[in-house]
Amino acid sequence: MTDTRGPQPQYEGYATGPLPGEREPAPGQASGPYHPPQAYSPAGGTQGGRPHGTQGDAQGASQAARRPRTGARTTPRTRKARLRVAKADPWSVMKVSFLLSIALGICTVVASAVLWMVMDAMGVFSTVGGTISEATGSNEGNGFDLQSFLSLPRVLIFTSVIAVIDVVLATALATLGSFIYNLSAGFVGGIELTLAEDE
């Protein structure tokens, strides 16, 4: 390729002159490393090779005394979201209600056993059973025996039957309730919830 721009001007000062670090010091000026001019230098420094005067000292002192400004302290905003429960899955509702009803049934059986033991230790069955047997007794035979009727195995069996019935009913009613909710949500839009996030 051929350069068609023609002769370019030569800058004599830049092409042949010494670099700033290689210049000869002026007569009466101490020789030392070259320091380029500074746009700002702290108090007591130099600007353009000349020491600061009184104005520079005052400016440096004011800059040193000035502290960085911090942003205004604001209270954290809590993000909120408004959601709507449009549909409840009947299968998931049935599984959750089944597990919860089983847990409730176990708690019922355990609570019945503990309550029976506490009442038996306090002598409630013996006292009430003696009163009932005296009231229902006759000369030919003894009355109603409450202690044998309300024994611990019978109480546990009765409570277990009630817990099983409760599991079946709670699961069926929860599943039916999910179907009813889906039908009503199709007309009115469902339940709206406002959720907030803690900062």
Image (cartoon, rainbow, N blue to C red):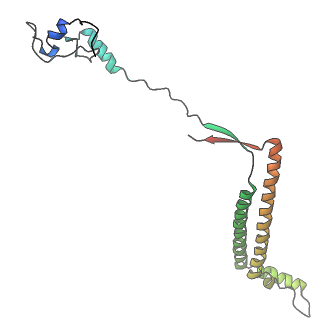
Residue 30 shown left or right of residue 104 in the figure: left
Number of marks in picture: 0
Residue at (77, 81) in percent of width and height: 154
Q: Where is residue 36 shown, x and y percent of the image?
A: 22, 15
Q: Residue furthest left?
A: 27
Instruction: Locate residue 137: give its quadrant.
Output: bottom right
Q: Where is residue 7 shown, x and y percent of the image?
A: 23, 6
Q: Where is residue 13 shown, x and y percent of the image?
A: 17, 7
Where 87 falls versus 95 (above or below)? above
Viewer-closest of 159 and 29 = 29
Query: Which quadrant is the C terminus positioned in?
Result: top right
Viewer-closest of 75 and 46 = 46
Q: Residue furthest front?
A: 1
Viewer-closest of 130 and 47 = 47
Query: Which quadrant is the N terminus positioned in?
Result: top left
Where 137 falls versus 76 (above or below)? below
Residue 49 shown left or right of residue 68 in the figure: left
Where 163 falls versus 30 (above or below)? below
Q: Residue furthest bottom?
A: 140
Residue 54 shown left or right of residue 178 in the figure: left
Instruction: Locate residue 107: give its quadrant.
Output: bottom right
Residue at (69, 66) in percent of width and height: 103
Instruction: Locate residue 146: give its quadrant.
Output: bottom right
